[in-house]
Structure formats: C-alpha cells, structure tokens
Image (cartoon, helix red, strand yellow):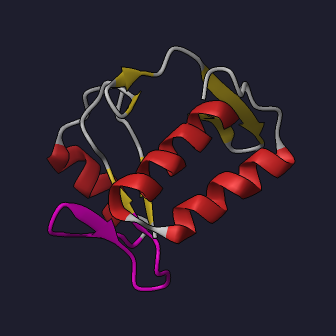
Amino acid sequence: MDLDFIDRLHTTRRQMKEVLAEIGFYEKDRYFVHPDTNFFLEFPSGPLAVGNEPVAVVEELRLDTGILRLLSPTDCIKDRLAAFYHWNDRQCLQQAVWVALERHVDWDEI
C-alpha cells in the first residue's frame, strides 16, 4: 500500500515534510501518511534500481498536472516478481500478471 518516489532533486527531509503537510500528509516512522487514504508515501534513497540493477530507461506519463516518471512495464514486472520471490507476496505476483496482460514487455530482459 505504499507509493515509492525517488527524489532526484536532493530535497531535504524537512522540505519534503513541509510541502507534504500542505496537502495533509504527516510523517510517521519513515513514511508519510494521510488520514483520507490507506496509501502511504515512501522516499527511498536513489539511484532508481530494481534489485541491484540500475534502471536505464524511465518511462514518462504526461498528465494535465505534469509529467509522472515511472518504471517501464518490463522493470515494473521485474520489481513485482522480485518482491513476490523475496517476501512470498502473492499480491505482487498478481500485479506482475496484470502489467504483463496490459503492456508490451521485453521477456528476454526479464
């Protein structure tokens, strides 16, 4: 239930806390939580990687509110499968299947 964001701008934790507080998030342990959602935010240190492998290509999704940079479908599946194998989390396996059914995937890379 967490959303991971890699801060590429080297924002301080204090700055992040102040900005997120403006939209109702507060810090709890290493996460930011909001009373109106079960999702919480995490800002792991970079660089962006799947396991020990740096992510070479970052996809972009253009929205009215700005650009959201994401893992490619292939890297997303690798990340979800790694979580499945590491924690035996079947929800992660289901997520990998959903992405595979909806997006083009480089199976040789996986």
- Residue nearest the observer in this picture, 32 or 75: 75
At horizontal 68% and vertical 36% (from top left) the residue drawn is 73
Count how many numbered circles sit on residues in the image. 0
Residue 93 higher or lower than 72, as above or below = below
Q: Residue furthest bottom?
A: 35
Query: Where residue 92 sits: x, y (%)?
Result: 53, 61
At horizontal 68% and vertical 21% (from top left) the residue drawn is 108
Residue 38 covered by magenta stretch: yes
- Left or right of 97 in this view: 43: left
- Left or right of 91 in this view: 46: left
Query: Where residue 27 sits: x, y (%)?
Result: 21, 67
Q: Which residues are magenta?
A: 24-40
Residue 7 higher or lower than 91, as above or below = above
Residue 6 covered by magenta stretch: no
- Residue nearest the observer in this picture, 9 or 77: 77
- Residue nearest the observer in this picture, 99 or 61: 99
- Left or right of 57 in this view: 37: left
Query: Where residue 49 sits: x, y (%)?
Result: 39, 28
Residue 72, can we see it?
no
Query: Where residue 70 sits: x, y (%)?
Result: 59, 36
Q: Which picture quadrant has residue 51?
A: top left
Q: Quadrant of the C terminus?
A: top right
Residue 56 higher or lower than 9, as above or below = above
At horizontal 68% and vertical 28% (from top left) the residue drawn is 60
Residue 50, can we see it?
yes
At horizontal 83% and vertical 50% (from top left) the residue drawn is 101
Q: Residue furthest top?
A: 56
